[in-house]
Amino acid sequence: MKIFRLLLTLALLCSIGTAYAKTKDTPQQDYRLDYVNINWWKQYNDDNLVNLMMKTYQNNQDLKIATIKSKQADQAVKEAFANELPYIGFNGSIGRDITSSTTRFGDLVIPDYSQTRFLLPFMMTYEVDIWGENRLRTKSVEKQRDIIKQNERASYINLTSEVASNYFNLIKLDKLIENQEKLVEIQRKIAEMQDIKYKNGLCSTVEVLIEKQALTVFEEELNDYKNKQDTIYNQLIVLLGERDANEIIRNSFDALSLPEIPESITADAISQRPDLIKAEDYIKKIGYDVKVARRNFLPKFTIYGQAGFNAYNNFSHLFDSHTFLSNVGIMPSFDLFTGGAKLAHLRYNKLEYEKAGQIYEKVLLTSIQELNDSLTTAKISKKNYNKSLERLDIEKEKFDLSQKKMDIGAKSNLDHLKAEESVILSERAEISNKINYLISTINLYKAVGGVDYNNLKAETNEENI
């Protein structure tokens, strides 16, 4: 009965190993909320934006698909770990043996006969991982799991950033439409006054046509703004994953807060980017694959065993002591000739490892470029916004002067309307530049890997990017 004890010991080891695997791979609670990074979006001081982020987290189908892929990767790791453990199975059979002729063994004669055979064996096989090949395979799968989890994190960063960008663009279009409607109304009055001047012989036909043409341009721009508003609205509905949503509550343009951006960011800020972490994990994964390919040249040793009962004709005697069947042994195996397949596989993985290094270098350079570009764009957007504010203030001062001149009769109502029109045109530039600055802060957030870049300020100029 020693074989039974051996099989029982291996079965207990299997259960302990499986329990260890479950404990190790248990995901952290609410880890996806860390990917959403609600604390970052709260700095825009807009509760509507935060609510949209939570709706995206709860409903977006792309995020759910990414999470499902991550869970599948966890199961793939468990499956790979299970391949390191012994296999224990049961393969029983009941059969009828029938001989068609007399069988002779020297002087011993066995006439033709028929009998029923009952076989109930437990079987065990275990490939002894002397060279650590199976462990390395599991580590490779674990790194593939880590890559998929970074894909999941990247999906959350990209989608939440896209939601925020569309949200701010929607607010921009709300304000631009309001602004454009004022512009159309003023231009309509200007065209009407110009037409009255023409009827009184105070201007030419060309001047009337120019004002009417300007009116059609403003009306066309208004239609374009409304079309863009509907398009972005529909895109945002899809990102939120709400099929029955009929309204997106949003903040007013004037209530938007502008977050600050750092003058410089440390060079290691890109270390949290999902694409860079993925490139590092891919190098490690291929490194494990190369080691597996090398160990594949070495011999393998498999422990096998069988224990059970083997009886003929009488089922009631199946579990008697004299029907007990057992065997155990070690089976070495070594491939003498594979046509160069193993060597080709090793060379292939070595080349893949070299390619992974080049991919990492490219991702590193691209990450630095995107960080530089995003930080520069954010700075320029902030400067442009400040300049547009200065220009708007100048236009308002000119409009105030125009009002004073009109009050004393030194300026016509038509010229005063044109001055008001100039103010509204300057407001349009200020609206666009303000939203462009907000979106540039989102792009900078993506460039540093979805972390708060305000905590990544450079301490020395040598470390600056």
Image (cartoon, grey):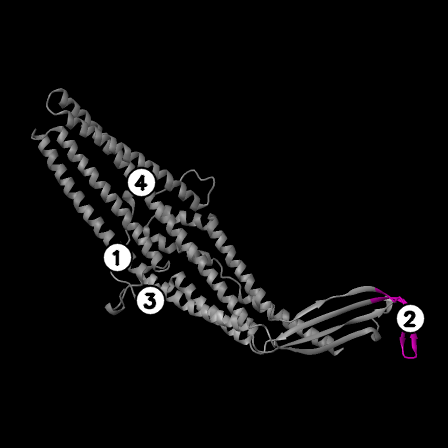
Residue holding disc 4: 173
* Residues at marks 3 and 2, CA–CA distance in whole angstroms: 86 Å
Residue at image position (36%, 46%) is 166
- Rate crowding at label 3 as few (under 14), some (14 to 19) or many (20 or more) other CA atoms within 10 Å: some
* Residues at marks 4 and 3, CA–CA distance in whole angstroms: 37 Å
* Residues at marks 2 and 1, CA–CA distance in whole angstroms: 96 Å
Residue holding disc 3: 268
Q: Is residue 184 left or right of residue 310?
A: left
In the rendering, at what x and y percent does residue 79 appear?
Answer: 58, 64
- Rate crowding at label 2 as few (under 14), some (14 to 19) or many (20 or more) other CA atoms within 10 Å: few
Residue 174 position by quadrant:
top left
| Relative vertical location of residue 133 with respect to residue 166 in this rendering, above or below | below
Q: Are marks 3 and 2 in contact (CB under 8 Å)?
A: no
Residue holding disc 2: 102
Q: Which mark is residue 297?
A: none
Which quadrant: the N terminus?
bottom right
Dot 3: what SS? helix
Q: Are marks 2 and 1 in contact (CB under 8 Å)?
A: no
| Relative vertical location of residue 68 with respect to residue 320 in this rendering, above or below | above
